[in-house]
Image: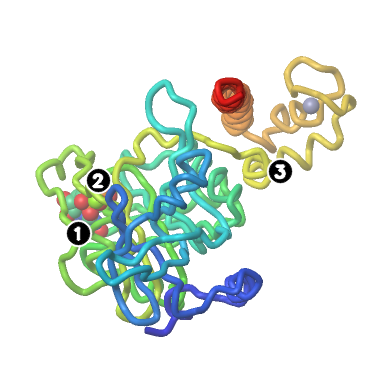
Amino acid sequence: MNLKKLGWNNNLEENIKKSHICRDNVGRVIFHSGKQYKLISKDGELIAHLSNSYLNSIESKSELPSVGDWVYFKQIDKFRPPQILKLIPRKNKLSRKVSGEKTEEQIIASNIDIVFIITSANQDFNIRRLERYLTIINEINAHPIIILNKIDVCKNYKKYINEIDKNLPNVTKLPISAKTSENIEEILQIIKPGNTIVLVGSSGVGKSTLINNLLGYNRQAIDETREKDCKGRHITTSRELIMLPNGGMLVDNPGLRELQLWSSESGISKTFEDINELSRHCRFSDCFHDTEPGCAVKKAVDQHKLSQKRLDSYKKLLREQEYLDKRRNTYERRKKDKQLGKMYRKVLDIQRLKGKKQ
Ligand SMILES: Nc1nc2c(ncn2[C@@H]2O[C@H](COP(=O)(O)OP(=O)(O)O)[C@@H](O)[C@H]2O)c(=O)[nH]1
Ligand SMILES: [Mg+2]
Ligand SMILES: [Zn+2]
């Protein structure tokens, strides 16, 4: 197996050199379930287990290897599967807040080059949702590409393309049909050997159909039952790195329905560069673009140079970010308090033991 085809690069090479890790002992996570990890290495696929030393060394779940991560593994004795000993630092990671009340990070995939944002040319299409995806992707410095699918059943799909042009300038977009293979060639040209690509988008937009088309056989389950309401169900149950025949790797996604921002400060400013640029001309540097006098952003809205909806969307994402930052800070402080408590009790125990001995 050629490691470069799996995404290996100079940065990673430098990294293992510094840690004196041999290239024979690095693998990329294709899939995992609990402590069991399916890796692909120079010598092909193998199953490895997370070592106890790894588990003991981490402070939060986000430090566990996830799909797309590079890890250092070793066969310690021949009676046990190879052990994962270390995580090789990630270039980036796509994460979300775990669903529900907890403010904890859940990693979807790591070391990502490109994200395909799939939408379909029907009622699924929603500029605000695309903006949200873009914010998250820009934050992690991956290259976003909007894919407008199902153009075979939409006579006037150009109106969606115009909408993208108008609202999301400078974003690469591609109209396709995963079913009839229209423009599939262009997608294949985008994907270079060694590229890691994550597919995001609501369920039913055709992510699995597109993957099957690119692979040339039916690997991913497709839900035909709800085709009429265009919604689809989540039937992709596990996340996995899928190798394409011409090189390149894809990650299909189960359940991104409630995709929430995790960290996205720079992602917001990159996605809303136009608003950022305008705000430099506001009279007050901390202008909320609300009722302040001399607001250049509001002026642009009045002059129809910027849509009110885009401004609302920008503010909404900022508010969400702020709320999440606060919650995360509280969560992290509580975690630290817990750790301190644990340490304190340990010290007390040791002192007590010492006392007994004397
Ligand atoms: N007409 C048409 N239907 C498609 C296309 N791509 C996917 N579909 C249909 O959309 C439904 C959901 O597709 P699926 O790949 O399961 O979506 P996923 O939830 O995003 O993985 C299925 O009924 C597919 O046959 C397309 O390009 N054109
Ligand atoms: Mg699917
Ligand atoms: Zn302003």
First in sequence: mark 2 vs mark 1 = 2
Question: Which of label 3 and label 1 is nearer to you?
Answer: 1
Q: Amino acid at mark 3?
A: Asp
Looking at the rendered structure, the secondary structure element under dot 2 is: loop
* Coloring applied to the structure: rainbow
Q: Which residue is mark 2?
A: 204
Q: Is mark 1 within 8 Å of ligand 2?
A: yes
Q: CA distance from mark 2 to mark 1?
A: 13 Å
Looking at the rendering, which quadrant does residue 48 occupy?
bottom left
Query: Residue 39 bears which disc, if any?
Result: none
Looking at the rendered structure, the secondary structure element under dot 3 is: helix
Quadrant where the image shows the C terminus: top right
Q: Which residue is mark 3?
A: 274
Query: Residue 220 bears which disc, if any?
Result: 1
Question: Which of label 2 and label 1 is nearer to you?
Answer: 1
Question: Which of label 3 and label 2 is nearer to you?
Answer: 2
Q: Is residue 250 left or right of residue 130?
A: left
Q: Is residue 161 left or right of residue 234?
A: right
Residue 28 percent across, percent down from the top left? 41, 67
Q: Amino acid at mark 2?
A: Gly
Q: Residue furthest right?
A: 283
